Amino acid sequence: MKSTQHEHFRDLLTHDHERLDAMLTSVLELTHVQAESALDAQWAAYETNLLAHLDAEEMFLLPGLGKHDSLHADRIRADHAKIRELLAEVGIGIELHLVREIQMLELARFLREHAKMEQEPLYSWADRAIAQSSFALVRNRLRDTWRKLRPASTPPRAQL
Ligand SMILES: [Fe+2]
Ligand SMILES: [Fe+2]
């Protein structure tokens, strides 16, 4: 049981990073063609899915990592706070129709670095230490969020 669980946490959350990255790329593409209603819908779906990812890590992974390696858990929490800050900045820009590409690129860059950093120790630790029941909760939450919120008009690049 445990060896299967180990692979699944890393696979699940890495795949979610990849889907989020692709979705942000499609948001950026929509800013270039000035498709405002599609941009609003894509951004709302992206934001919800990214927040679901952060929330799942904070609820199910970080409390345990904090007991094992509080330095890394604090660093990940600080990154999540920065990600929420960047999300708010971009979201306000979209709301006001003043999207700044540089803010989106900064968000994309920060998220890629964060995703790399989470491989060790968070995901490797989670695969060793977190119960199958918690894994199923994380998987189901992420899956349900993607199913509910993916807009019908999602560009193909986001459908990974
Ligand atoms: Fe994270
Ligand atoms: Fe993550």
Image: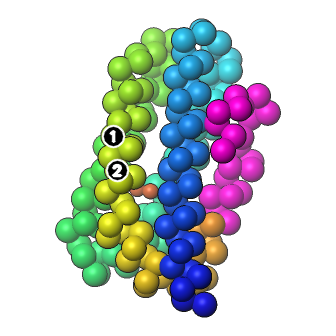
Which quadrant of the render holds ligand 2? bottom left
Circle 1 crowding by C-alpha within 10 Å: few under 14, some 14–19, many from 20:
some
Query: Where 130 falls versus 159 (above or below)?
Result: below
Ligand 1 within 8 Å, label 2 CB:
yes
**Residue shown at 50%/50% (left/top)?**
17
Magenta segment range? 140-160
Circle 1 SS class:
helix
Q: Which residue is mark 1?
A: 110
Circle 2 crowding by C-alpha within 10 Å: few under 14, some 14–19, many from 20:
some
**Residue shown at 46%/55% (left/top)?**
54
Q: Quadrant of the C terminus?
A: top right
Q: Where is residue 59 drawn, in percent x and y? A: 47, 68
Q: Is residue 81 visible?
A: no
Does the residue at mark 1 contact the one at mark 2 (Cβ under 8 Å)?
A: yes
Q: Which residue is mark 2?
A: 114
Q: Where is residue 146 drawn, in percent x and y? A: 68, 49
Query: Where 103 falls versus 57 (above or below)?
Result: above
In which image quadrant can residue 83 be found? Answer: top left
129 or 84: nearer the viewer: 129
Query: Where 148 falls versus 103 (above or below)?
Result: below
